[in-house]
């Protein structure tokens, strides 16, 4: 069953950086970004930004044996007047279901999940929309669940931030609310640059 969900989500993610993909989010997920005022606040890059080049691949799930819960993470990149900022490279990175980053500085006490890449990137569409196939973030020692995000356009970094999971600590304006649809969670967040 999980394999079918994974294949369905991966196919959906590859084919849908479109209006229908972002429409899958729940009302509560959209409400989080609607409450934002002004630009999305910056946050630390953190010590685990990938050392290998981040591939242009929005599917971080390498097989259906990954540890954790599948997450279809979508959203938009907008300017402060709510206009799409297209042709933006969105990079994400996060720890795996074992709370381990795919990075040489990560803890050696727990092994990496070989079925989870840990980072990926995509280019948004003309309406500013993007989508990733990843996992619901999990905490690791001393940190609440979060996803790191870096936005780049024409070799210029527009924003480096972190999105935190609703129900845990972190800035309220950067909380991600998930909703479960079948065996996959979905969430959306709009970045204002």
Image (spheres, helix red, strand yellow):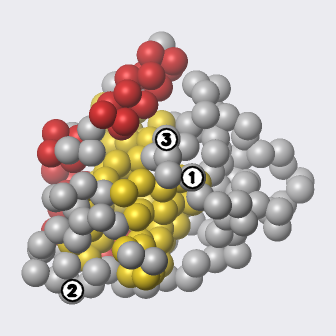
Q: Nearer the viewer, mark 3 or mark 2?
A: 3
Is disc 3 in contact with disc 2, using a CB cutoff of under 8 Å?
no
Q: Secondary structure at mark 2?
A: loop
Look at the image and tell me whether residue 171 can be seen. Answer: no
Q: Nearer the viewer, residue 87 or 127?
A: 87
Look at the image and tell me whether residue 109 can be seen. Answer: yes
Q: Quadrant of the C terminus?
A: bottom left
* Residue 121 x/y as whole percent: 48, 56
Marks 3 and 2, the one that precedes in the sequence: 2
Q: Secondary structure at mark 1?
A: loop
Is disc 2 in contact with disc 1, using a CB cutoff of under 8 Å?
no
Is 88 left, or right, of 94 in this rendering?
A: left
Q: Residue at x 34, y 25 (%)?
A: 182
Residue 55's disc number: 1
Spatial separation of the CA atoms under disc 1 and disc 3: 10 Å
Q: Nearer the viewer, residue 141 or 38?
A: 38
Spatial separation of the CA atoms under disc 3 and disc 2: 30 Å
Q: Nearer the viewer, residue 189 or 144?
A: 189
* Residue 184 x/y as whole percent: 40, 32
Q: Residue at x 45, y 77 (%)?
A: 155
Q: Is residue 106 above or below residue 43?
A: above
* Residue 95 x/y as whole percent: 64, 55
Q: In which quadrant of the rendered view does residue 173 lie? A: bottom left
Marks 2 and 1, the one that precedes in the sequence: 2
The residue that label 2 is drawn on is 38
Spatial separation of the CA atoms under disc 2 and disc 1: 30 Å
The residue that label 3 is drawn on is 59
């Amino acid at each position: 069953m999980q394999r079918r969900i994974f294949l369905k989500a991966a196919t959906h993610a590859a084919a849908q950086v479109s209006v229908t993909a972002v429409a899958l989010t729940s009302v509560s997920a959209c409400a989080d970004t609607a409450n934002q005022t002004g630009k999305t606040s910056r946050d630390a890059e953190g010590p685990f930004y990938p050392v290998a080049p981040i591939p242009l691949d929005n599917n971080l799930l390498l097989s259906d044996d990954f540890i954790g819960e599948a997450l279809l993470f979508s959203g938009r990149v907008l300017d402060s007047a709510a206009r799409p900022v297209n042709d933006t490279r969105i990079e994400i990175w996060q720890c795996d279901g074992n709370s381990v980053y795919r990075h040489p500085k990560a803890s050696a006490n727990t092994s990496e999940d070989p079925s989870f890449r840990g980072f990926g990137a995509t280019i948004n569409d003309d309406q500013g929309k993007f989508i990733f196939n990843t996992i619901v973030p999990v905490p690791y020692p001393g940190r609440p669940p979060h996803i790191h995000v870096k936005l780049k356009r024409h070799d210029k970094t527009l924003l480096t931030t972190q999105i935190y999971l609703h129900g845990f600590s972190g800035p309220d304006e950067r909380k991600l609310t998930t909703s479960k649809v079948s065996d996959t969670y979905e969430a959306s967040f709009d970045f204002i640059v």
